Amino acid sequence: ASGELILLSSTAQTPQDEKDEKRMSDHPELRDPLRGCRYVAAMELAHEPRVRRHLRELYRRHAALSTRPTKAGLDVVDAFHEHYGLHLLRAKPLREHFPMEEREREARTRGLSADERKELEEEAGRTERESCVQYLNVLRAEAAGNVKAYVHLPPAERDDPDWHRRTDSFWRDRSNQDASPLFGELERAYLPPDGDSDAWNAERRKVIRLCIRHFLLPQFEAEARRDLKEAAVKFGADSAAESLRAMAMEGPYRPSHLLGENRFLVETGDLPIVGVCCSTDNREATYLAAVNRWGELTDSLPVPGGTRVDDNRMRESVITFLMKNRPAAVVVGTGGGLDSRMLARKIGDLVTRATERWNNRDIQGEDEDDEDFEGRSREFHAKFGNTRDEDEDEETQWRCNVDLVDDNVAQLFGRSVRGKKEFPDKTVNLKVAVSVARHAKDPLAELCYAWSVASDAGV
């Protein structure tokens, strides 16, 4: 292997080869006759088992995890994106992802009571679990192309305001890492205890530097990433099971005016719900979907891509849609991030107008004469059917909430085989909107529905 690193003899066969060889031979490092010897010595030192074991433990003690957003991540990761917070991790200690070392445990528990030790162990276990689950999410963000992750020793320049803008070449250049703990340990073992000339010690330090940067650090980084993934998968499976249990125990959507009532004494009932899927692509429409008590799609309204829900063209269409279906709640999926939040706010304003218009339908305005009032009543009757209810009072007037809800299950249904079989001619966003409404009505049924096998009939 060392023969490839030094010029042992001339191999030139053509005039061009002679020129290239002469140009390379002028490089001072390539002309160094000890370069190949240092390479062999560094390789032998790096493959010494005791050296590797000791330095690996030292590396784990000082190594850190950092992430930076990619070009695509800068465009899509906002404060409401699922990868937000994962794209700017800076030098998070790697030891938080693994059980506490015995030496550290003894030092931290010395002099503590039994209860304090138990609390410390629980805190360490919680930190380990949360760190491992976080790394699993980092891997997912990296696979999506939104984040780049790096395992490294602390940076040589600690106060770097532009660290998140550094490219791969910076992070892969191990001369930018502070490897002094490893250098110090290896120097104590490799340099003669009785001393030697400065020239020979300088050569030994070159061997140590080559050993650490060229052989050990790349392998330690690869091993750390492998172990991080294994630990993350183990804790990730446990976390997924806990999340699935929490999702299965989630109750149906309950309007705000019933939150103060006992769920067992005052039933929620079969509420009319409208689900909303916010499009993240201007080429696709945002959908509002109304479902009945059995979760069947009864009505839908597309908002064309690039069109605001509250502009002059769509405002009356949305208000009419809401008045026609009169939902107890409009639930907006969070899949659109910040756009979903803005959409929920705009729909909230439209819901306020729709409920006021509906609840005041039988009240004659101050500037409205009898003929205008009768005309407006006939128009209401023609558009919405019989709107008069003898028993309707203040307590039974139409009230509607607008809320943001998690739409992970709905997104799964919208792209599933079952979704295609049940709604073969519907768009993905409409299927997601239907599932959002169904999940609000009966979360457990929709969760089971997403994981069960669909028949040819789509049931």
Image (cartoon, helix red, strand yellow):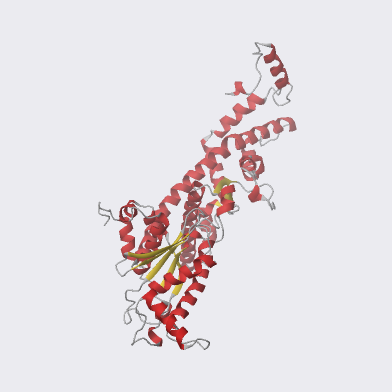
Where is residue 86? Give x, y as percent.
Answer: 54, 55
Q: Is residue 77 above or below residue 115?
A: above
For the question of whether residue 341 can be seen, the reply is: no
Nearer to us in this view, 316 or 178: 316
Q: Is residue 120 left or right of residue 155?
A: left
Q: Is residue 64 above or below residue 361?
A: above
**Residue at 46 percent of width and 76 percent of height:** 354
Where the C terminus falls, by quadrant? Answer: bottom left
Nearer to us in this view, 271 or 123: 271
Where the N terminus falls, by quadrant? Answer: top right
Where is residue 310? Give x, y as percent.
Answer: 53, 68
Where is residue 132? Give x, y as percent.
Answer: 47, 54
Nearer to us in this view, 419 or 357: 357
> Where, by quadrant of the figure, is residue 38 drawn?
top right
> Where, by quadrant of the figure, is residue 8 drawn?
top right
**Residue at 42 percent of width and 59 percent of height:** 408
Nearer to us in this view, 160 or 410: 410
